[in-house]
Amino acid sequence: MKTKLLLPNHFKTPGWIILIPSALLGLFIIISDYEFKFLDMKVFTIYSGSGVFQDPVLFGMIKANLTGTLVGVLFLIGAIFVAFSKEKSEDEFIAKVRLESLLWATYINYGVLIFCFLFFYEFEFLYVMIFNMFTILIFFIIRFYYILYRAKKSLSHEK
């Protein structure tokens, strides 16, 4: 089956190598509220107005810690590589599972988001929205690989 928009299969291994450590590091950073001090630096921003004692900055430089940014970008790159790399034998069944998993992940993601709109408020809702950026890829990867695992397991039992 010809799939134009999927990455080549060899992206999957580097994807897992990036995804797993960045996910673990991200969880550690969330739980401990830790930042690497060597990632404190001046960075370009389009807009920054969140400082209590600072004037808003439009198209300028600000001092920021890039720990969360770096871990988030690495997680997204790894998750995209894992989620959207071709399988070794990409056929109609895998394409169907891929589409159904993406649809399922979208439904679950927005179900969780509706729940959070109803039960989280103020600053905690900001954390929910940050986490929500990653959940659709997480849900997709979990379901897609679970269905493939189940399919391979059922095939091995038939032999």
Image (tube, rainbow, N blue to C red):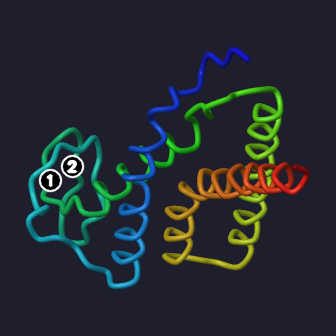
Q: Nearer the viewer, residue 8 or 38?
A: 8
Label whose residue precedes the other's in the sequence (1 or 2) = 2
Question: What amino acid type is highlighted by mark number 2?
Answer: Val
Residue 30 image point, x, y percent: 39, 76
Q: Residue at x 19, y 63 (%)?
A: 65
Mark 1–mark 2 Cα distance, whole angstroms, equals 8 Å
Considering every residue shown, the one lying at the far right of the view is 158
User: From the viewer's perspective, is residue 48 above or below residue 95?
Assistant: below
Which disc is residue 62 wearing?
A: 1
Residue 114 image point, x, y percent: 75, 64
Q: Is residue 9 left or right of residue 59?
A: right
Q: Residue at x 62, y 34 (%)?
A: 87
Q: Nearer the viewer, residue 33 or 59?
A: 33
Q: Nearer the viewer, residue 32 or 14?
A: 14
Q: How many marks?
A: 2
How packed is label 2: few (under 14 Cα within 10 Å), some, or many (20 or more)?
A: some
User: From the viewer's perspective, is residue 77 above or below residue 28?
Assistant: above
How packed is label 1: few (under 14 Cα within 10 Å), some, or many (20 or more)?
A: some
Which disc is residue 18 wearing?
A: none
Which disc is residue 57 wearing?
A: 2
Q: Residue at x 73, y 57 (%)?
A: 146
Q: Quadrant of the N terminus?
A: top right
User: From the viewer's perspective, is residue 39 above or below residue 15?
Assistant: below
Q: Are marks 1 and 2 in contact (CB under 8 Å)?
A: yes
| Quarter holding residue 20 | bottom left
